Amino acid sequence: MTATEEPTETSKWDPGLTERVIGWLRPLIKGYHRAEVRGLDTFPPGGALVVSNHSGGLFPMDVPVFATGFYEKFGYDRPVYTLSHDVMFTGPIAEFFVRTGFIRANHENADAALRSGGVVVVFPGGDYDVYRPTLAENKIDFDGRTGYVRAALNAGVPIVPAVAIGGQESQLYLSRGTWLARALQLDKLMRVKILPISVGFPFGLSVVVPPNVPLPTKIVMQVLEPIDVAGQFGEDPDIDEVDAHVRYVMQKALDKLARERRLPIIG
């Protein structure tokens, strides 16, 4: 970047700050959640798009769990970026999020981060996925969103599927509340399509608020073999076919983790 160029979100990543933050988070990740990240031995060099399920409601731990495991293995020379909702970039701590690798979820940021050799984490299911009911906690569902496939193709990087289990046991998720959002016309007034309903500690029933404290559930993340989209499906693949394959391998891996899990929360 030259002196006359405006700094981009990706160029603002601060490895020193990120290392300190991971140090602060490690007791929570390794102690409270007893987190494990498996499969990093097959992680490819260079830019890579990590596609994962999303869990934990208002307090998802997927990014801290993955980042802690990734940086422990590979160090801080290679940034982990997370495509995030615009709401994270308003207010006094927006710059903190940018400096620790959170970037706005748009095609330009994704492409810049991937082409720079960074690792980009995306949760295609977004809020729809992170508030899935407990009865569907082990189901891969992106709500039909497939833009991540095009992002990987455009940047010429592999897709690295990853699945995590345990995060959706942090409280009892009853419903995404899509029906409630429609009934209150929030979808029209505020473009809000869900109004999640859950039960947890210490407040009991919660409709988004009051926010309950996440239970100390054990979180296990499995990183899967990278998928060379162009190599496996051709230079101009059927996007839906690629998406179906990614979700298939993720569902198969998540089913395996679910079979290995002995008890909820305890793991």
Image: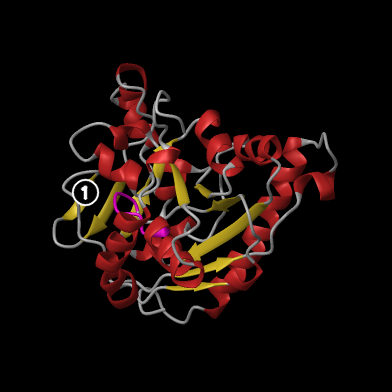
Side (left or right) of 244 relative to 175: right
Query: Magenta span: helix, strand or loop, mainly?
Result: loop
Q: Nearer the viewer, residue 104 or 47?
A: 47
Residue range in magenta is: 57-62
- 22 w.r.t. 122: above or below: below
- Residue 59 picture location, percent across and down: 30, 54
Q: Is residue 138 visible?
A: yes
Q: Dividing the picture into quarters, in which one does residue 102 lie?
A: top left
62 with respect to 94 (left or right): right
**Residue, far bottom:** 262
Mark 1: which amino acid?
Ser
Looking at the rendered image, the quarter that the C terminus falls into is bottom left
Residue depicted at x 51% and y 43%:
125
Q: Is residue 215 visible?
A: no
Q: Residue at position x 39%, y 46% from top?
A: 13
Residue at 36 percent of width and 79 percent of height? 266
Would you identify the image quadrant in which residue 95 lies? top left
Question: Which element type, helix, strand or loop, lies under badge 1?
Answer: strand
Q: Is residue 190 above or below residue 158?
A: above
User: Outermost residue, front direction?
Assistant: 3
Is residue 28 placed above or below 177 in the rendered structure? Answer: below
Question: Is residue 242 rendered to the left or right of residue 134?
Answer: right
Q: Position of residue 66 (x, y in %)?
A: 45, 62
Q: Position of residue 199 (x, y in %)?
A: 25, 56
Q: How many marks?
A: 1
Q: Nearer the viewer, residue 41 or 254?
A: 41
Residue holding disc 1: 206
For image coordinates 53% across by 41% down, the residue present is: 113
> Can residue 87 be found in the magenta stretch?
no
Q: Is residue 44 left or right of residue 73?
A: right
